[in-house]
Amino acid sequence: MKPITRALCAAGFFLSLFSIQLHGQTASEASASVWQHSINNMEDWQRLAAPERDAAFSKFVLDVKTGQIYFFDAHVFKLHIDFGLQVLLKQARTHDSVVAFNRNYAAVKPQFILGYITHYPKLDLWTMSFWEGDAIGVADVKKAHRALQRMFLANVRGAQPLYFRPDSLRQERMAKRINDPHIPVIQNDKIYQKHPFVAFNVGQTIGTLRIVPVNLAFDALAFKTDDVVVLQQAYPDISPVAGIITTQFSTPLAHVNLRATAWGIPNAGYKNAASEFAPLNNQLVAYAVTEQGLSLRAATQEERGQHEQRQSEQRTVTLPAAQIDNPTLAPLHSLRAVDARIYGSKTANLGEIMHGAPQVHVPDGFGVPFYYYQQHIAAHGIQAAIDATLNDARFGRDVAWRKAQFAQLQSQIQAAPIDVASFKKITAQWRGQLHGAGVFVRSSTNAEDLKGFNGAGLYDSVPNVKTDEALAAAIKKVWASVWNERAVNERVFMGMNHREVYPGVLIQTAVNASAAGVLLTTDIWGHNPHTYTVNAKFGLGMRVVEGQKIPEQVLYDASNHGTRIISRSNETTMLVFDPKNGVREVPTPAGDTILTESRARALGDAVQPLIRLFSSDAALDVEWVLEGEKIWIVQARPYVVKQK
């Protein structure tokens, strides 16, 4: 790795060329109060360490020339360079001094080893680590570990060893060469999976606790909107509830967790929830989640009254007006964002990318407008069945009845034949524009990808469609998915008018991806600036957001191209195209890594034009696929935000 010349400087620039003032003293004058050569007891540690989620960290600098180690206050010195220049080198911050200091992140350290000590109290775990962009080698890891063992006394750590925690793929590879029984190594994903608690969405609520039995089938899930649910296994989705606790962790980008964020409800992973809260099952409870932990207890009488008041309030999401009289089958490159009123947001946004960011790779395709769905519904008398269901008094109060009605309605939509002349136009467009190649048939409605509501995963898509018969079935499946139970429940919760919802269809060239995933232009783990959250899985990636297996998760810092590992995928199989039609399941490549540093950087570069195109002040949710080393963008929309 090349020496970092600007990395890690921006966040500390507020210090400028001046010394920090501490109780009327400069940093050098007050140095005894903000750094020390050893950590002698827990009081020393607590004074120097700063909190971070379910952990606390302090920083150290080891002078490789003198062997001296310096533990400094992480509250005062935000970056190693702040302490290094001001206290150790007593130099002003200039371009040359910054360049010189940042050479300490190279493989050969000119003067300093710059590291972190992190304590995870709930795991009773202590780790030593280095910035993810640090090209540190085996010898310097051993040198730092020996120094910490000498000066970071055992009475602080008790009997627990000090682990080396690699924070990048480069460091993971290097760690395999350490071969020292005195330096145990632990990966970030092991810490992630072992942790008893993870905050996915902070907040508080009142609701009835429902502990879902182990192995309850997904189809048997039935909740009220004021339930606080404990899920003891991973589910691909959930209907609107008041709060969520999961006992098996997954990615924050799983559909269940995205739903919780969109609804603005508290949501956490807590391994012991089912047993610890069993005495409160089926009772009204007060539930709160913070970054540090959760609380759940019986609700007070006052809280019961507040709960009843909130239950009477109705939220309303207004849908953009749809234009249903336009029969034009439009190539993606001809569409703009404003065409969402005809083709749906997904299709229109991809057209906007093709036009406004031509350097971004988007698979070719065309939009089938709302017109053809409305034609299908009218031609077969299905609108009467829709109206009868929506008008029935049971619609709002009987979830099981509603589920059965819409399952029947979906069967009607899929059983009815598509208009012959219309389907002939669609197949002609497919063969003419896309040369009859295999395609993804994707949903694109006017009730998704909106600011404040992205509707992720509500509607269906069909992969690798290769025949006329399969294409007709796929189009009707996408149309019918506008009445998926999860979609209807979500729209009920959001106060949407179902009669104003229209499904378009995006027919898009299929990319036989070696890997795929989601990138958010925000750090949903630590809220660090300029940092993106990236999830990935091998194959077509259709399971990335189902949450049933842990994907690869990394944080990518766009300001310095650093990549920090959160977890590696635990999937053993992946989905690939079947040569005939559809998909099949095969084993994942043994020992391979999806999100290498170069791929993470390429993804970061690929989304920059999208940020400029769609929003520079709000996070984007971007779906991508990898074909070899080529990155394709297949969706871009606003990241879900808390609803009021």
Image: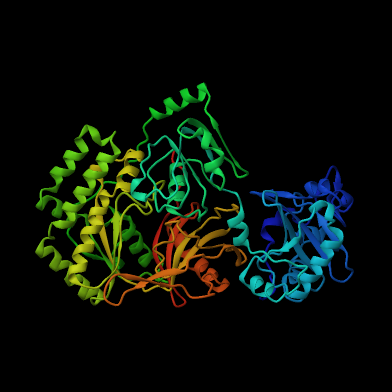
232, above or below 476, in the image: above
Q: Give the position of the C terminus as an image quadrant.
A: top left
Residue 108 percent location from the top left of the image: 76, 76
Query: Residue 152's image quarter?
Result: bottom right
Residue situated in front as seen by the camera: 636 or 168: 168
Q: Residue at x 55, y 72 (%)?
A: 596
Residue 605 horizontal side relative to residue 166, left or right: left
Residue shown at 69%/61% (left/top)?
Answer: 9
Q: Residue at x 41, y 61 (%)?
A: 543
Would residue 505 be seen by someone viewing this image from the given angle?
yes
Figure quadrant of residue 580: bottom left
Does residue 481 appear left or right of residue 596 in this picture?
A: left
Query: Is residue 566 placed above or below 447 in the rendered structure?
Result: below
Q: Position of residue 99 (x, y in %)?
A: 73, 70
Residue 625 in picture, x, y percent from top left: 42, 69
Is residue 90 at least partly visible in the picture? Answer: no
| Image location (x, y in percent) of residue 376 | 14, 55
Numbered-mark total: 0
Q: Nearer the viewer, residue 142 or 510?
A: 142
Q: For this rendering, which residue is in front, 599 or 214?
A: 214
In the foreground, 1 or 232: 232
Position of residue 54 relative to residue 64, above or below, is above
Quadrant in which the N terminus is drawn: bottom right
Task: Check the image and report above or below for 549 versus 99.
Answer: above
